[in-house]
Image: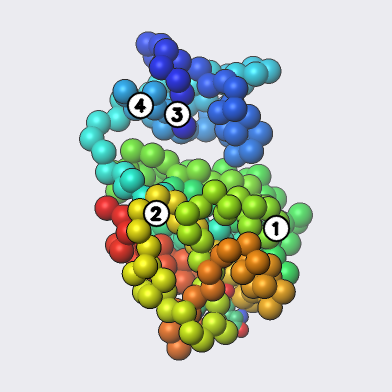
């Protein structure tokens, strides 16, 4: 998370305003969660120490040196999958360099998030991602949000320069052709369906919002394979 100059003081950082709202109310970070905090001059691994009414106080555990981050921001919109598959996606996509993972619930989702104790799962994904960051030498822990609806995921994708939606029934547009034409994109969104895939209606909705359907070829990949493979292809082709 970025804070204004002057908000990092000694061993503490102070997050307020829009960043506070995003961190606490949107991403639902809690006391004890860790996040990288930067004021553009220095970067630290911080732990949320206290959440007040309109600001969070972070204890800075460690100064981060070097930079393994790509300027490309890949947002993975992932149809929520059964537990171990999400764990795998979080770990591997963090290593690959994905900046945000946004799980979503869609028509053919098989995971019932009401019963699935989702807060605990999000906590678990954040921990897996933090470990993967350390292991791969990344400076920035990807943001992992609580699951949103497909409609909300589409709204969030509007901030991307390009968003793609791999769809088995797409016959014409191949991923490599779409990526070949991309110039100067900083934020790329990738939508991967759940085990049951996307409905035709969802694909139409995505297309109406400028999201580009692509084929990954004639073999149907498992959702977790598709998420990892497409993230790696996009990072290789457009990132550092
Ligand atoms: N249930 C679907 C079916 O009947 O074929 C398969 C869904 S697949 C397991 C999960 C997701 O991976 C899809 O929603 C899509 O985003 C992606 N996917 C897998 N293979 C693909 C391919 N060959 N082309 C495009 N997308 C693919």
- Mark 2 to mark 1 CA distance (whole Å): 23 Å
Q: Nearer the viewer, mark 3 or mark 2?
A: 2
Front in this rendered view, residue 42 or 123: 42
Q: Is residue 81 above or below residue 148?
A: below
Q: Is residue 218 above or below residue 29?
A: below
Q: Nearer the viewer, mark 2 or mark 1?
A: 2
Q: Residue 150: percent from the left, percent from the top?
A: 68, 60
Check residue 201 in the rendering and tell me which mark sits there, or answer none: none
| Residue indicated by mark 1 | 151
Q: Are marks 3 and 4 in contact (CB under 8 Å)?
A: yes
Colour scheme of the picture? rainbow
Label whose residue precedes the other's in the sequence (4 or 2): 4
| Residue indicated by mark 3 | 2
Q: Are marks 1 and 3 in contact (CB under 8 Å)?
A: no
Residue 183 visible here: yes
Label whose residue precedes the other's in the sequence (3 or 4): 3
- Mark 1 to mark 3 CA distance (whole Å): 27 Å
Q: Crowding near pointer 2: few (<14 within 10 Å), some, many (20+)?
A: some
Residue at 46% in and 71% down: 226
- Mark 3 to mark 2 CA distance (whole Å): 21 Å
| Residue indicated by mark 4 | 40
Label whose residue precedes the other's in the sequence (1 or 3): 3
- Mark 3 to mark 4 CA distance (whole Å): 7 Å
Q: Are marks 3 and 2 in contact (CB under 8 Å)?
A: no
Q: Crowding near pointer 1: few (<14 within 10 Å), some, many (20+)?
A: some
Residue at 42% in and 67% down: 230
Residue at 41% in and 71% down: 178
Label whose residue precedes the other's in the sequence (1 or 4): 4
Front in this rendered view, residue 24 or 177: 177
């Amino acid at each position: 998370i970025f804070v204004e100059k002057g908000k990092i003081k000694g061993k503490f950082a102070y997050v307020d305003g829009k960043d506070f709202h995003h961190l606490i109310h949107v991403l639902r970070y809690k006391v004890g969660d860790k996040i990288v905090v930067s004021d553009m001059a220095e970067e630290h691994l911080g732990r949320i120490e206290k959440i007040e009414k309109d600001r969070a106080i972070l204890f800075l555990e460690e100064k981060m040196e070097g930079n393994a981050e790509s300027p490309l921001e890949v947002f993975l919109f992932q149809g929520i999958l059964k537990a171990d598959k999400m764990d795998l996606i979080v770990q591997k996509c963090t290593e690959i360099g994905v900046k945000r993972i946004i799980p979503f619930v869609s028509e053919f989702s098989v995971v019932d998030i009401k019963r699935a104790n989702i807060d605990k799962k999000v906590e678990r994904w954040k921990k897996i991602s933090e470990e993967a960051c350390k292991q791969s030498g990344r400076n920035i822990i990807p943001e992992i949000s609580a699951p949103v609806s497909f409609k909300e995921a589409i709204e969030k994708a509007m901030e991307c320069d390009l968003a793609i939606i791999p769809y088995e029934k797409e016959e014409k547009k191949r991923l490599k052709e779409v990526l070949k034409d991309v110039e100067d994109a900083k934020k790329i969104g990738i939508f991967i369906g759940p085990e049951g895939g996307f409905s035709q209606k969802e694909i139409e909705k995505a297309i109406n919002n400028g999201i580009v359907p692509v084929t990954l070829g004639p073999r149907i990949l498992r959702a977790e394979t598709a998420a990892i493979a497409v993230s790696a292809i996009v990072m290789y082709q457009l990132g550092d």
